[in-house]
Image (cartoon, grey):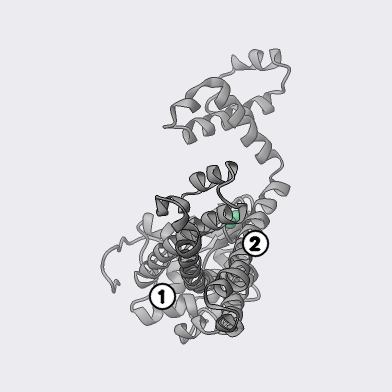
Amino acid sequence: MDGMKPSDASLCSLSGRSWNICVELDQMRRLARQLASFPPLLHHEPVMDVISRVLFFVKKHKRIIYPVINILGATYTLVMILIVALINVFHTCPVLYGDDACRFPIMVAAMFFQVCSNLFLIHYAMKINKVSYWTKEGSFLLPKSVRPKIQEACQEGAPLPGNPQLGKFCFECNLNAPRRSLHCPLCDVCVLRCDHHCFLTGACLGIGNQRYFVVWLAWICVGAAYSLKYMTIYMYTFIAPKFVFDYLSFWVPFAFFKWIFGFETFFNVILAALVNSTFWAVSMSSIAIGGQIFFIIKGNNMWDYRKSIKCDGINLKERFELIFGRNWYLNFIFPQFWNRNVMTEEIATNIFLISTKTCRWSLVCM
Ligand SMILES: [Zn+2]
Ligand SMILES: [Zn+2]
């Protein structure tokens, strides 16, 4: 209620709204103002009002809208992968090299298996991200020496008055949550060692599913690069030579105008859009893999890194085993879902019980 003054109550009642609704709208308006800090158009009060109403509507119906956002994100990704794969298997490759040269179902099937199985596991392993998993059914993963202390510190119910330094209380989950957790409103759960919420997979990435995300990214990168090769050669061979500026055929708005005036087929416009999206997928997944590996090597993650939290693990082996389990590299060949996260006493203490010392740039930090 920081932004509302008591005198606003009369204005509120004049507009025929209850005080609570007015406060919520005011909060959303301030949020909209923060979001629109630089596009000048959004500084206009009517635009701000529309944005705040949309945000208010989303917040009011979050139990329905948030899961739908997650489902739509994962569905969009799967549909795009399917379209690109089908176009390459049944069109660009056979037209370029003939039917016989394109009989590579094992390669395509392997990429499909990796992408789909890891996407499934990203969602399935979200339960391991939950703080309650580690204190209940997954408590055997904690070292015995610190297990009772962690179970006591992360109790559900009322906030513990005696040991507030061990964590924070999440009113959404009704849980004494460790500082190394973050409540995600979209997934509606406290995520342990939260990295970020990924809209393209529709899931939060934390201690339990980060490994599947890294492997998924790697296979997305391989698959997208493979598809990009076929689509680019196809465009240069059959589409670009028909026009004086070859490269313009790859520019979607230009290809679209060519189609409007009858100089291009709609399929070719779609192909230009897919070449652009696939190029974007290769670039972004490469950058994301680099970032993920960088933070794993540092014994941290994106979120904790910004908060200058002490690194997990004293060497690379401990840091990789914490995320991937034993024999981390095997995950890239087949998802090692039976290989659990390995947590030493020191890491468990750092994740569940304390969060203090700054350690950013040294590879091995104590
Ligand atoms: Zn929570
Ligand atoms: Zn989330």
Helix, strand or loop for disc 1: helix
Residue 132 lies left or right of residue 162; in this view the side is right
Given residues 60 and 81, the one toward you in this image is 81
Q: Quadrant of the C terminus?
A: bottom left
Quarter holding the N terminus?
top right
Say which residue label 1 marks.
346
Q: Which mark is residue 79?
A: 2
Sequence-first disc among 1 and 2 = 2
Q: Residue at x 61, y 52 (%)?
A: 266
243 sits to left or right of 23:
left
Question: Who is closer to the viewer here, 260 or 166?
Answer: 260
Disc 1 C-beta below 8 A from ligand 1: no
Position of 67 relative to 288 (above/below): above
The local secondary structure at tag 2 comes to: helix
Real-space Cα separation, disc 1 to disc 2, in angstroms: 43 Å
Mark 1 is on which residue type?
Glu
State whether residue 337 appears in this view: no
* Residue 178 circle label: none
* 221 is higher (above) or lower (below) than 144: above
Circle 2 crowding by C-alpha within 10 Å: few under 14, some 14–19, many from 20: few
